[in-house]
Amino acid sequence: MQEQKYSIKQWAIDDRPREKLLTKGPSILSNSELIAILINNGNKQKTAVELAQEVLRLGKDNLNELGKLSVKELMKIKGIGEAKAISIAAAMELGRRRQAMASREKPVITSSADVAGYLQTILRDYKHEVFAVLFLNRSNKINHFQIISEGGITGTVADPRIILKRALEEDAVSLVLCHNHPSGSLKPSRADEDLTFKIKEAAKYFDIKILDHLIVSDDGYYSFADEGLL
């Protein structure tokens, strides 16, 4: 005899994710219950919570890993269609932006550690290398952040002309260069050092200072300035 499947509507009210959130607050809910609210409903085989648990397993039970999954990867789970996958991806992006804004709200950049957390949050889910720049004003406040170029898994190239043109448009007096290493390695390559020197020399002609070049990964960060390479 086939086991009967119960929907969330048949659960006790205190056990339903939506009702639990309303009565006890979102912090009391597990990750799977929060994702179940995003999924909204299950199917004939599984409840929304059970589907959410599968989503978490696909992300190795780690929200950081879950945030790296694409809509197509999420749709590999039977019962997660495009609409559900889009809802999950949108929620992950909102969480990432909230964390990034919290880091960016620090008024003045005084050290590599000030910007490393912000940059790690923005770049951590890229599976390929990206080169980004922070444009700072005279008070070392962030005027603008921009990803300048995106490359492959092993590298990317940034054009100094594009960077300096944007710096002039933003009235920036100093820059922090940054790129990620999806491999996790924090050691700069010779190409990284050459590019940093090229941008630094070009910026001198516009009285723009390169404060640092940061390499970030999930394992931490590497600062050219801290290591005496600028």
Image (cartoon, helix red, strand yellow):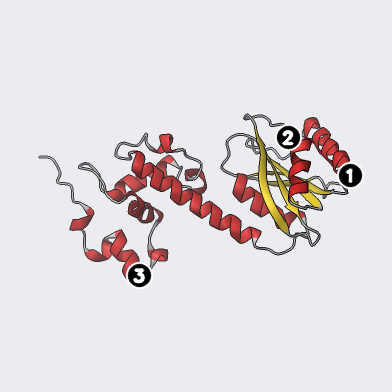
| Between 66 and 103, the one nearer to me in the picture | 103
The quarter of the displayed image where residue 107 is located: bottom right
Q: Is residue 188 visible?
A: no
**Location of mark 2 (residue):** 158
Mark 2 Cα shell of 10 Å, populated few (<14), some (14-19), many (≥20): some
Q: Residue at x 30, y 47 (%)?
A: 50
Q: Is the C terminus in the top left, top right, bottom left or bottom right quadrant?
A: top right
**Which residue shows up at 33% across the image and 55% down it?**
37
- Pointer 2 with pointer 1, Cβ within 8 A: no
Name the N-terminal-most of marks 3 and 1. 3
Residue type highlighted by circle 1:
Lys
Q: Which mark is residue 76?
A: none
Give the left or right position of residue 200, taking residue 32 as reference: right
Secondary structure of the residue carrying numbered label 2 = loop
Work out whether 111 lies above or below 88: below
| Residues at marks 2 and 1, CA–CA distance in whole angstroms | 17 Å
**Horizontal and vertical percent position of residue 155:** 68, 30
Across the whole image, how many numbered discs are drawn on residues? 3
Residue 26 visible here: yes
| Earlier sequence position, callout 2 versus callout 1 | 2
Crowding at dot 1, Cα within 10 Å, few <14 / some 14-19 / many 20+, comes out as few
Q: CA distance from mark 3 to mark 1?
A: 57 Å
Residue 204: give its label: 1
SS type, badge 3: helix
Residue at the spot of label 3: 24
Q: Earlier in the sequence, mark 2 or mark 3?
A: 3
Pinpoint residue 211: horizontal percent, then vertical percent: 82, 50
